[in-house]
Each structure stands twice: as structure tokens, then as C-alpha cells.
Amino acid sequence: MRCVAFDEHFDAATLDESVWLPHYLPAWSSRAATAATYEIRDSCLILSIPPEQGLWLPGEHTPPLRVSGIQSGNFSGPVGSGIGQQPWRAGAVVREEQRPFWGWTPDRGYLEMRACGVITERSMFAWWLVGLEDVPDRCAEICVAEIFGDAVQDGASAAVGMGLHPFRDPQVAQDFQAVRLPIDIAEFHTYAVGWTPERANFHVDGDLIRSCPNPPSYPMQMMIAVFDFPDRSTGDDADAVPELIIDYLRGYQR
């Protein structure tokens, strides 16, 4: 029997910062440069990237990247060290030390998010789980949904990426695929993973889409973000505002 272990409907006026950090991997940049643009409206969390939002790591990250994201955990070593979560390149160093913060960090279960997105060819949105990296090998990723705007046919279909990335975890194998589905991402859909010791089963709107064996076997934090890549501009999209609208996140455990 499954019981609800986590249920986030964004009903409060502000983001619950005992659960969520409204920044994207701030150790490699800074809290100031990684602050998410967001609002809570009609019981939905709306992550957006307005035209005036700056780059995540100005002058260094290739390609240039803008992002609004939240995460349910955070951790780093001291400034100048290489200890941190999801380093963006080999040799990345911590620029701003982060105190350990653990909101909801599940260890298996059935997790689902109901969401929709507004993106163009230069943007994307994603929901994924990553190891806390409090121990270096605990670094793999379970990507539940990753959708690039250039893989969307408006109103008709989208390629939805899902699967496992090992990074530096020797116990997890690379197993990732973008599957084209007949969905309109501007409408709400439910993206989910059933995570057991044996498999990670990926679902969209209740349908099983992919199944990957031997997923990570340690607590993971949630990462949810919308991204913009300015170097993919078509020249007439400077005022585009990518958005990810999240109705709810829910986690069940046995």
C-alpha cells in the first residue's frame, strides 16, 4: 500500500523555504546570480526567465545560460574546493560556500509532478533528482522529464527525455532517451517515476514510457528548472519569457 509522504500544492503565499531553495546550484556561482524568478498564483508555482534576468555564471559557462530553478537540497565544500553538487565542468571550484540544507530528499517511492511549460527553440524545462553528493559517489541523476523547445511540435508532440545519468557513480549505467509523445506541453501533464531498488519506471499521464534497471540507491534531492540559452536566439525572440508552471508535486512511499 502506498502512502503520501510529500504533497506540495503551492497553496501558501510564499515558497516554503524549509523544503525549497529558490536557487540553481549556487555554489558554482553565487546566491545573487542564481536567484530564481518565480511567483505563486492560483495554487501554482510559476518559474520564469524575464528578458532582464542575467546569466547564471557570466563569462564562464559555455554555452551562456540563464535559469530559474528550485531545489530541495543544497551542499558544498569551502570556497576554492571542488566539493559540490552537479559540477558544471571538470575542475569547477566553489565560489560561494553553501550550508547543508535538506528539504525533502526521498529514497525511492512514486514521485509525480503535474506541470505545463511555455518555451521556444532557445529554452527548455526539466525535473530531475540528483544524489546529495555528501558522499562523492552519491552523484547520479534520475531525470523524470526534460523537454527542449527545439524538440517540440506546437500543440502536437514533444520529445520527453527520461532516464539515468551516472556521472561519477560507478554503480549506475547511462540509460537515457528522449521519447516523442503526442502531447501539447502547453497543457498540464503528469510526469512521474516509480523508483524501486530494482528499476526506475517513467510515466507520462499514467502511461509507462520507459523502464531503467539498477537506479541509484541513496537519498536524492529534487531539481526543477526552466532554462534559456541566449546563443540559440533566432534574432526575433529577445522578449520571449520561458515559463514552467507547476500545479503540484507528490511523493508516495510504501
Image (cartoon, rainbow, N blue to C red):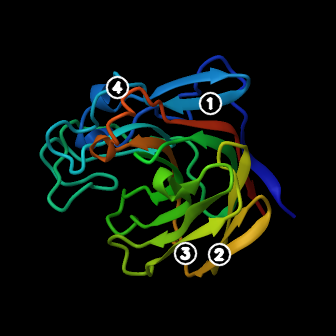
Q: Distance between the residues labelled 2 and 1?
A: 27 Å
Q: Sequence order check: which comes first, mark 2 or mark 1?
A: 1
**Which element is circle 1 on?**
strand
Q: Sequence order check: which comes first, mark 3 or mark 4?
A: 4
Residue count near mark 3 (Cα–Cα under 10 Å), binned few <14, some 14–19, many ≥20: many
Q: Which amino acid does label 2 sit on?
A: Arg
Q: Is 56 rendered above or below residue 111?
A: above
Label 2, on which residue?
210
Residue count near mark 1 (Cα–Cα under 10 Å), binned few <14, some 14–19, many ≥20: many
| Viewer-side label of 4, 1 | 4
What quarter of the picture does the C terminus occupy?
bottom right
Instruction: Kindly indicate whether the residue at mark 1 contacts the one at mark 4 (C-beta within 8 angstroms).
Output: no
Q: Which residue is drawn at 37% across and 58% down?
A: 133
Number of residue marks: 4
Label 3, on which residue?
215
Label 1, on which residue?
45
Q: Can residue 220 be spotted in the picture?
A: no
Instruction: Kindly indicate whether the residue at mark 3 contacts the one at mark 1 (C-beta within 8 angstroms).
Output: no
Q: Sequence order check: which comes first, mark 1 or mark 3?
A: 1
Q: Sequence order check: which comes first, mark 4 or mark 1?
A: 1
Residue count near mark 2 (Cα–Cα under 10 Å), binned few <14, some 14–19, many ≥20: some
Marker disc for residue 53: 4
